[in-house]
Image (cartoon, rainbow, N blue to C red):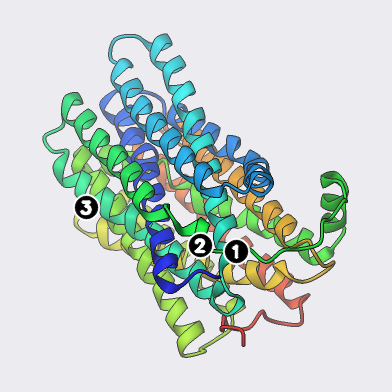
Amino acid sequence: MKLGWIDILRLGLVQMALGSVVVLTTSTLNRLMVVELALPAVLPGFLVALHYGIQITRPNWGFLSDAGGHRTFWIIGGMVALALGAFGATFGVILFETGFSTALAFSIASYALIGVGVGASGTSLLALLATATAPHRRAAAATITWLMMIAGIAVTAGVVGLLLDPYSPELLLKIVAVVTAGSVILTVLAVLGIESRVQAVARPRDRTRFVDGMREVWAEPAARNFTIFVFLSMTAYFMQELILEPYAGLVFGYSPGQSTSLSGVQNGGVFAGMLTVGIAATGLRIGSLRGWVIAGCLGSAGSLGVITMLGTAAVPVLLAPAVTVLGFFNGMFAVAAIGSMMALAGKGRGAREGTRMGLWGAAQAIAAGFGGLLGAAAVDAMRVVLVDDATAFGVVFASEGVLFVLAAVLALRVIEQDRGHFGAIVPEG
């Protein structure tokens, strides 16, 4: 048996829960450390980079779920680890008010646990989707679950932003406890019984060593060049993740609740951008994925330019609309890049689809951590050199825009090497 649409939607709820918990650590806690606690932006940048760095172990979690045949166990267990890590990270932020060393040690352990949880749960979930979804439903399943994750991020950020004002440590702990406990319960209800009713398509055992398989994939020019594109574009994508809310607080005077809501409207824009490409490329068959990737990258660069100018002009009323537009183009780029990844995964030597996806997933995880840390460290350095916060943040946003332009140029080159375009995402059969 294969996954039905209801099963796919249920697994999408797990993705939604993952996004809901992670957004608290990358937006709300980050802003509190930089603005309320006046800690250097590089500190939350390091912590978030740590949780992304640990996700390089994703292939190991996938192997464990493959070998043991108990993906449900790893999905639920990973979510429990993520929830505990997120609550611990929240408690660590509060500890910074009384003791730096203890709080730092507690935060490092908590963010490491977050990385383990996301890696175990997310990888096992995607493995279940990949092996138990009928071929003609795979593209749609990937789109649905990704959009549900973005929806979870956007809704959680928006609702938490409204509930967090006026801010207090006690209120923060209560909100995070409700979100993390709710995510675990939702995951258990969503995933139970699904794995026992589906049967993955068996594949002949491949006795090739993992290292040799990676060498084979890296020897393929298309896979190697696309890995470089993923790293560059995702570095640009994540550079603003840890500095946008501090920017809103320091330059525009946003409260913790307002800046958290800003993250919500940004992810709302991401959702709209993904949905636009999904409808246009899948339903209406408008344009190629190459065109959507390039448009998303260039649009993101232009939006960052607008956000930079708003800071120097001190126009707070236009910040939220500009951030929404940035999210829209980010979403457009992201979903088109995912479609391109899906198209390339099956090209080259056979029986290496998972290895290619793992390679690109590792590149994305490294870029996410590196980009966030780079953006935070650059802001710290620019605030020392330039003094004026608006100009300091603006230099970093402008640099991010340049990276997006370079990613667009590289995408054009990489896709042209693959006969011009990847084509639209259409169901097989």
Quarter of the view holding residue 426: bottom right
Q: CA distance from mark 3 to mark 1?
A: 54 Å
* Horizontal and vertical percent position of residue 422: 66, 79
Crowd band around label 2 with a 10 angstrom C-alpha radius: few (<14), some (14–19), many (20+): few
Question: In terms of secondary structure, where does tag 2 sit?
Answer: helix
Q: Residue at x 40, y 40 (%)?
A: 26
Q: Residue 188: tell me if it is visible.
A: yes
User: Would you name the residue on which mark 2 appears?
Assistant: 197
Amino acid beneath label 2: Arg
State which tag comes first along the sequence, 2 or 3: 2
Using the image as rendered, state which of residue 251 and residue 373 is in the foreground.
373
Quarter of the view holding residue 260: top left
Tag nearer the camera, 2 or 3: 2
Amino acid beneath label 1: Gln
Crowd band around label 3 with a 10 angstrom C-alpha radius: few (<14), some (14–19), many (20+): some
Q: Which mark is residue 267?
A: none
User: Would you name the residue on which mark 1 appears?
Assistant: 199
Residue lying farthest to the left in this orientation: 166
- Quarter of the image with the N terminus in it: bottom right
Tag nearer the camera, 3 or 1: 1
Q: Residue at x 43, y 46 (%)?
A: 241
Q: Residue 313: tell me if it is visible.
A: no
Q: Residue at x 11, y 34 (%)?
A: 166
Using the image as rendered, state which of residue 354 and residue 253 is in the foreground.
354
State which tag comes first along the sequence, 3 or 1: 1
* Relative to 343, residue 99 above or below: above
User: Would you name the residue on which mark 3 appears?
Assistant: 316
